[in-house]
Amino acid sequence: MSAAHSFEAVFGRPATIFERAPGRVNLIGEHTDYSGGFVLPMAIPLHTEVELAPRRDGMARVGSLDVPGAARSTFVLGCEHRTRGWLDYVQGVTAALRADGFSIRGFDARFRSTIPVGAGLSSSAALAVALLRALRLAFSLRLDDVAIARLAQAAETDFVGAPVGIMDPMASSLGRDDEALFLDTRSLHFERVALPRTLELLVLDSGVKHQHAGGGYRARRAEVEQAAQRLGVALLRDVGPERLGDVAELPPPLDRRARHVITENQRVLDAVRALRAADEAALGALFAASHASMRDDFEVSVPEVDRIVASAAADPDVVAARLTGGGFGGAVVVLARAGHGRAAARRVADAAGSDVRVVLPAPSAKE
Ligand code: GLA
């Protein structure tokens, strides 16, 4: 970076704190987290980084190297107000800290990220977690990694107005490369599950941008809540596969929505076993069933994503593939035979269409 664009050139003094947080991909367990269900996300080696210098006053000056025109924006702590832009994710964090009784002073901060925005890879959770890590250090806040995840979720739900679940901030705050986080989103109990050495993780971005503050996610969440109410439970997590008969009696589309959530929870449990046993056939079948359920029952896939999943399924080195994240566009997660991932990702992307981009493995310098 040229000196003209350094933190010091923008803010008049050097940064003293450098933190970062990863994006995530969800292996399986989609649209289950706001029902208290199971998820299996994994941190990915793409990050949002923040450089920060604490201030003595109550002012926050914030910049981003990724957002055009966002060289520097300013707000006063305690006077956060929604702008409907990326700054809301920063203001959401400071508002959430205050709501939880933490007191901080102002700061100068600048972000940069390698996580594509709108691809369903949790760029927003990574921003919030990275900032919370930096503020924890700057102001000696007593926050553990789970508390950071809860605050990041509050920033997004309460301030930005996107009613997301706890999966993404938990994955960003606690996730590690090459290990999935098998998480019970009700108790927040988690176990780490290693990706078998025989498998390699690929991520392909469909190029169709999703928006969580948008209507689709909110509508699905409301349908799931209605289904739970009609089944007489607080959360669909409390309905097991033995009640699929009752579920079939619900009026459409609540029957399909509930069937997705209930069968998806079971698929997470089965996928954890399959990963531990490195059972490729089982993983392939579970990912395929999860994708079909998201497409047909939950109706959150789009044709571009279905095409990527279909071309992945036809590839000899692909073990499993499905839509990952909230849907309505976004990315596909693929498990490929280790050592063959890069070539397989290229073949799948080429076969699926021109807007498809290989996110992982990250392109090598030659590409
Ligand atoms: C988005 C939300 C998560 C989760 C997924 C769907 O990523 O942020 O909380 O609901 O969608 O599994």
Image (cartoon, rainbow, N blue to C red):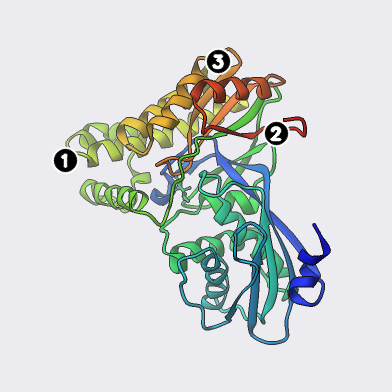
Front residue (pair 300, 33):
300
Residue at (51% x, 26% y) in the render:
321
Q: Earlier in the sequence, mark 3 or mark 2?
A: 3
Mark 3 in CB contact with mark 2 (< 8 angstroms): no
Q: Is residue 239 above or below residue 233?
A: above
Q: Amino acid at mark 1?
A: Pro
Beta carbon at label 1 within 8 Å of ligand 1 = no
Q: Earlier in the sequence, mark 2 or mark 1?
A: 1
**Image position of 198 (left or right of 251):** right
Which corner quadrant of the image does residue 275 belong to? top right
| Residue neighbourhood size for the residue with mark 3, other residues' Cα within 10 Å, grouped as few (<14), some (14–19), many (≥20) | some
Position of residue 17 measured from the top left corner of the image (x, y, whole percent) = 78, 67
**Image position of 186 (left or right of 263):** right
| Residue neighbourhood size for the residue with mark 2, other residues' Cα within 10 Å, grouped as few (<14), some (14–19), many (≥20) | few
Q: Amino acid at mark 3?
A: Asp
Q: CA distance from mark 2 to mark 1?
A: 47 Å
Q: Which image quadrant: the N terminus?
A: bottom right
Give the residue at mark 1.
Answer: 251
Residue at (80% x, 71% y) in the render:
8
Mark in the foreground, 2 or 1: 2
Q: Which image quadrant: the C terminus?
A: top right
Q: CA distance from mark 3 to mark 2?
A: 20 Å
Mark in the foreground, 1 or 3: 3
Q: Is residue 244 above or below residue 91?
A: above
Q: Is residue 316 above or below residue 45?
A: above
Give the residue at mark 3.
Answer: 315
Position of residue 330 measured from the top left corner of the image (x, y, whole percent) = 48, 40
Q: Which mark is residue 79?
A: none
- Which secondary structure, mark 2? loop
